[in-house]
Amino acid sequence: MERYVPLLAITMGDPAGAGPEIVVKALADPQVRPICRGLVIGDAGVMRAAADIVGIPVHVHAVSAPAEMSSDPDTLNVLDLKDVDLSTLVRGRVDARAGKAAYEAIEKGTILTIQGAADAIVTAPLNKDALNQAGYHFPGHTQILAHLCGATDAVMMLTADTLRIVHVSTHVSLRDACNLVTRERILRVMKLGDEATRAMGVEKPRIVVPGLNPHSGEGGLFGHEEEEHIIPAIEEARKLGMDARGPLPPDTAFLRAFRGEFDLVVAMYHDQGHIPIKMVGFDKGVNVTLGLPIIRTSVDHGTVFGKAGKGTANPASMIEAIKLAAKMVSTSRGTR
């Protein structure tokens, strides 16, 4: 039987940033071409300009639906939203019009994926300032996707190589993050992380849970969250069949996961999880949104305004995001 090749909706990101350029580079990469059918969601004119900037000789084929895609390997298929005026676009500058175009690409790509016309969505970076200036008041991609999918509680996972980190909280103050460390929240995040790690090909994930406080509270000397919330969540997870361990001191937990002892780390707050993933794979980290009815992966970096229009932005994170989305689609189809 012929191997199924996933169709991925890949958003162009903010057209004033380097997103369109890294998308062109990634889809031309020899690692990517055999594993997916990439359909760029955005403006065809922007993608033609991006191909010229990076010097990759591809034919941009504008379509209005996935059924119109070309199978020619030297063709870049773009579902053309025709929503960017190149004559007024200034690369490297925050612009509400660019924020609007970036949102429209996310919206269209999400709808296609929900409808089953695409197998997964992979997103290039957007600029939060431009997004808000355009009237879309979301902290970032995760909240946009949750809104579009009707999901009440999306969760962020970051991956780099074999290090996978799922977050109990993300874009809130540190004071508020401490209040979100509850037994119920930790258990939900563990469940979603366990499911996602299985979708990435790990049959029985080994989960480690760091403490919130230094030395995991040192028996209550440095805080009581471990005894009141984290330990009960771990115990409940074990009853549900998960291989969950901890709470370990955070510095030890991440080091042991990096060395291969664990498949998934449950970070208690944004920076606890982001710092180690950036240290391990700043250029190739991938953001995965859990808790949605669709598969979504993304680059783990911003719009790279400083390199926009220069053709020098690194596509490594986008390449890894595409590879991971294709892997998760294939695993999902194999379990149906």
Image (cartoon, grey):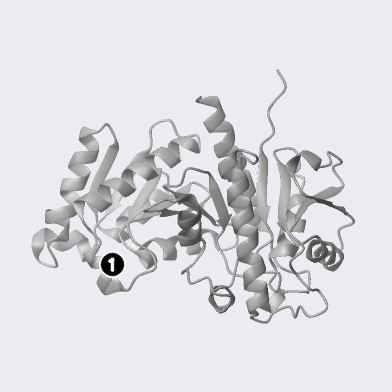
Quadrant of residue 242 in the image? top left
Whether residue 168 is situated above or below residue 91 in the rendered picture: above
Quadrant of residue 89 in the image? bottom right
Name which residue lies at 71% across and 69% down. 15
Name which residue lies at 9% across and 62% down. 220
Task: Tell which of 110 and 307 is nearer to you.
Answer: 110
Quadrant of residue 72 in the image? top right
Left or right for 273, reference 288: left
Residue 261: in sight, yes or no? Answer: no
Task: Tell which of 229 and 110 is nearer to you.
Answer: 110
The x and y percentages for residue 41 are: 70, 55
Name which residue lies at 77% across and 63% down. 82
The x and y percentages for residue 190 are: 32, 45
Considering every residue shown, the one lying at the far left of the view is 220
Task: Tell which of 79 and 290 is nearer to you.
Answer: 79
Around disc 1, counting alpha carbons within 10 Å, would you say few (fewer than 14), some (14 to 19), or many (20 or more)?
A: some
Left or right for 283, reference 35: left
Residue bearing mark 1: 177
The x and y percentages for residue 1 are: 70, 17
Q: Mark 1: which secondary structure?
A: helix
The amino acid type of the residue labelled 1 equals: Ala
The x and y percentages for residue 241 are: 27, 31
Name which residue lies at 75% across and 50% down. 27
